[in-house]
Image (cartoon, rainbow, N blue to C red):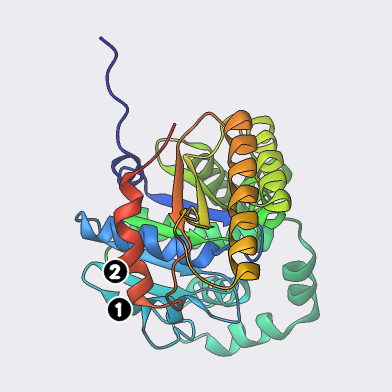
Amino acid sequence: MAKPAEPLLERLAARQLVVVTGKGGVGKTTVAALLGLALSRIGRRVLLLETDPRESLHQVLGIEPSGGKVVPAGPRLWAQNLQAPAVMEGLVREKMPFGLGSVADRILAHPVYQHFVEGAPGLKETALLGHAYRIVHHGGRPKVDTILLDAPATGHGLSLLTAPGLLADAIRDGQLGEITAEIAAFVADPARCALVVATLAEEMPVQETLELIALLQEKLGRGPEAVVVNALYPPCGVGAKGPSEALALWRERRQLNERELRRLKAGWKGDRIELPLLPVDRSPALLEDLLPFLGGARP
């Protein structure tokens, strides 16, 4: 008898890094926060990392903006807004011997350093992933089991995952080459790093999702751990009441959702989580209402 598939949350809980990506506007940050909350509820110590400088993760978690610091977001759950330049600056200052802060300041202000940070392909992406790698492998405060990264939108999300490998190929020698190779191996290891794609059941998001899955299989040799379909219109019942125009629009949106779900299912045979559109603002209340739907992974 075939062994039953391990539930999605248990598979994600076994990973050290879970990267959530998807087309802009599909609710990617909400999905990342939802997964982070769910993992914390089953006992994992989770750090949610956000890379968008505009900071929106705090809204759905109901906490103050991170401002670059690690802030509590609930039992066994923390959040941090993380920017690559800040990570790079921290590394420079860390490598300076005690008392040489003025030297670090001159390095950081030097045009050669600025040009290198801005121009080196894949450096910023590798710095962000390196931050996650160091936390789970070398410890940090707080100590966490899983880092859940709210990654940039679809195309940039793929660049994030492939950057360490490209940089490792370009820099083979020295301490930087060694560290980059370790990060590349970390991201490429499906036992340590997983990817989740957020989407809407609409034409463009589904198309981008299918294209991303194909590119992941081509570039990394594997697809996502799951696709999360967000904000599905509920079926419009026979007895539904309301203005005829509103009901017609409701039925039209539901039909569109069903058509795109069929297309997604035809192109993706892995786990699919379906989250309903709820009349709740982006807030902790929304996460609580969505949590029960995470157990309903569909093949």
Q: Is residue 53 left or right of residue 134?
A: right
- Estimate how packed mark 1 is, as few (under 14), some (14 to 19) or many (20 or more) residues with alpha carbons within 10 Å: some
- Estimate how packed mark 2 is, as few (under 14), some (14 to 19) or many (20 or more) residues with alpha carbons within 10 Å: many
Residue 57 location (% of width, % of height): 47, 75
> Looking at the picture, which amino acid does disc 2 mark?
Leu
Q: Residue at x 41, y 41 (%)?
A: 192
Element at label 1: strand
Residue 41 location (% of width, % of height): 22, 60
Q: How many marks?
A: 2
Residue 210 location (% of width, % of height): 67, 39
Earlier residue among tags 2 and 1: 1
Residue 194 location (% of width, % of height): 46, 43
> Looking at the picture, which amino acid does disc 1 mark?
Pro
Cα–Cα span, label 2 and label 1? 6 Å
Vertical placement of 253 versus 50: above or below? above
* 129 vs 94, nearest the viewer: 129
**Residue bearing mark 2:** 77
Vertical placement of 28 versus 243: above or below? above
Q: Is residue 136 left or right of residue 175?
A: left
Vertical placement of 216 versus 177: above or below? above
Element at label 2: strand
Quarter of the image where the C terminus is located:
top left
> Looking at the rendering, which quadrant does residue 44 occupy?
bottom left
Q: Is residue 105 left or right of residue 232?
A: right
Are the residues flagged by discs 2 and 1 in contact, CB closer than 8 Å?
Answer: yes
Examine the rendering and report whether any part of residue 22 can be seen: no
Q: Residue at x 57, y 70 (%)?
A: 51
Q: Which mark is residue 264?
A: none
